[in-house]
Amino acid sequence: MNPRSKIVGLVAGALLVIALAVGAALSRGGEPARTPAAAGSALAPDQSHAPPAATRTVLVSRSGRAAPSQPGGPMNAERLTGAVPSAPTIATVLSDEDCQPDADGVSHCRNRLRLPGGRELTVRHPHRMADVPCMTPGERVRVAPA
């Protein structure tokens, strides 16, 4: 085998590996798997950022800590900054950060939410990622006072 044939074979093999990796990613819905990242990162495990099919409700406490969200119910959050709407309001999730779980396995994710008129509300959402997915940037949620 001459040197040119070896190079062509190596390039063809590399292209095959790339094609297989792209095919595997597309079979998972087109997004690469997310892995836990360093504290302060917006990334979390793959399924924690899968957008839900239905609009979820976030009950925001104006003061005090919120209990961890439970599967099948509304999400609980505590207000960090911004005004909590007095009536249920649709908001767009802008961020999902600080999702590292504590010693009890509860993540205390920080989420910025864009309210109507461009106002922002920042909340802390305690939840176990295996039970209740994180809020996903771009997701629309119903925000209401707790």
Image: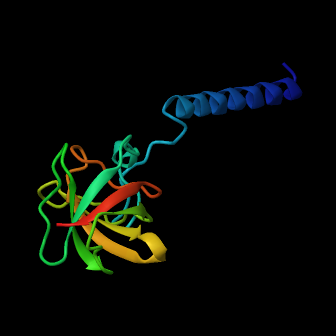
Up-down: is 96 above or below 64?
above
Residue 49 drawn at (x, y percent): 39, 49
Q: In the picture provided, is 97 more to the left or to the right than 23?
A: left
Residue 106 drawn at (x, y percent): 17, 57
Asked whether residue 100 appears in the rendered view, the answer is: yes
Rendering quarter of residue 93: bottom left
Nearest the viewer among 124 and 76 is 76
Point 18% across, 44% down: residue: 71
Point 52% across, 28% down: residue: 27
Residue 70 drawn at (x, y percent): 15, 49
The colour mode here is rainbow
Up-down: is 105 above or below 62?
above
Residue closest to the far top: 1
Asked whether residue 107 appears in the rendered view, the answer is: no
Q: In the picture provided, is 4 more to the left or to the right than 50?
A: right
Nearest the viewer among 31 and 92 is 92
How many numbered marks does the figure carry? 0
Up-down: is 116 above or below 140?
below
Rendering quarter of residue 143: bottom left
Point 40% across, 64% down: residue: 41
Q: In the picture provided, is 77 more to the left or to the right than 32?
A: left
Point 29% across, 63% down: residue: 88
Rendering quarter of residue 64: bottom left
Residue closest to the far front: 87
Name the image quarter holding the C terminus: bottom left
Name the image quarter holding the N terminus: top right
Residue 57 drawn at (x, y percent): 27, 55
